[in-house]
Image (tube, rainbow, N blue to C red):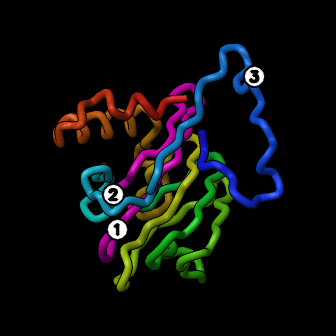
Amino acid sequence: MPEPARSEFWKDLKPITKVFQPDALPEVYIPDAASEDERLYVPFTETVFSRPLWISPTQNKWCDILMSKGPGLVNRHYHPHEVFAYTISGKWGYLEHDWTATAGDFVYETPGEGHTLVAYEHKDPMRVFFQVTGPLIWLDEDGEPDGYFDVHQYIALCRAHYEKIGLGAGHVDTLFR
């Protein structure tokens, strides 16, 4: 039950009783998604970390908070599907574009667009909410495919990290929908 209403105009409104349709899974609610607790962030590269928030193994999709406490890098890649990003804090961009994102900025990544994600030195850590659909296709220096990273590799990375820090490998399974 949410916090009770006091003076809101809807204070006498009753919640619906049929919340979920048959076979629907419960929502994922994560308080303080962009937490300061660094244990929750899975090392993605040597300088960039990911906190998984929602994962769909069957759709090859995930939502996460990408975080870097200083200069950071996610090597060259492209996405064959769309990606959405909302900047929570810090400063980041793509070497291939003429913008730099800061708190409050939104980015839509077009399917097939290649880029190199960089985090800048900033007083606040870079924290960006991403919704990723499909794999990252790693690129060589000429922009040609050189491997991939998909939801199944992401899950394995998360399981290994959460097992190592004592939360247990199954912790990430609670985010599957």
Q: Residue 11: horizontal and vertical position, in percent?
A: 77, 50
Between residue 54 and residue 18, name the one nearer to us: 18
Task: Specify start and end residues of the magenta stretch as a single range.
Answer: 49-75
Between residue 140 and residue 90, name the one nearer to us: 90
Between residue 77 and residue 36, name the one nearer to us: 36
From mark 3 to mark 1, how far is it between C-alphas? 42 Å
Q: Classify mark 2: residues with Cα within 10 Å, few (<14), some (14-19) or many (20+).
A: many
Nearer the observer: mark 3 or 2; the answer is: 3
Helix, strand or loop at disc 3?
Answer: loop
Q: Residue 105: horizontal and vertical position, in percent?
A: 61, 74
With 163 as the anchor, is 125 left or right in this view?
right
Magenta stretch contains residue 39: no
Q: Quadrant of the N terminus?
A: top right
Q: Residue 3: horizontal and vertical position, in percent?
A: 60, 49
From mark 1 to mark 2, how far is it between C-alphas? 6 Å
Q: Amino acid at mark 2?
A: Phe
Q: Classify mark 1: residues with Cα within 10 Å, few (<14), some (14-19) or many (20+).
A: many
Helix, strand or loop at disc 1?
Answer: strand
Q: Amino acid at mark 1?
A: Ser
Residue drawn at (28%, 52%) of the image: 43
Lower sequence index among marks 3 and 1:
3
Could you say which quadrant of the image residue 36 lies in? bottom left
Relative to 135, does residue 66 appear above or below in the rendering?
below
Lower sequence index among marks 3 and 2:
3
From mark 3 to mark 2, how far is it between C-alphas? 39 Å
Q: Which mark is residue 49?
A: 2
Relative to 161, does residue 34 appear above or below in the rendering?
below
Relative to 177, does residue 22 appear above or below in the rendering?
above
Q: Which mark is residue 18?
A: 3
Residue drawn at (44%, 77%) of the image: 90
Q: Residue 101: horizontal and vertical position, in percent?
A: 55, 77
Q: Identify the residue position indicated by label 1 in the image.
A: 68
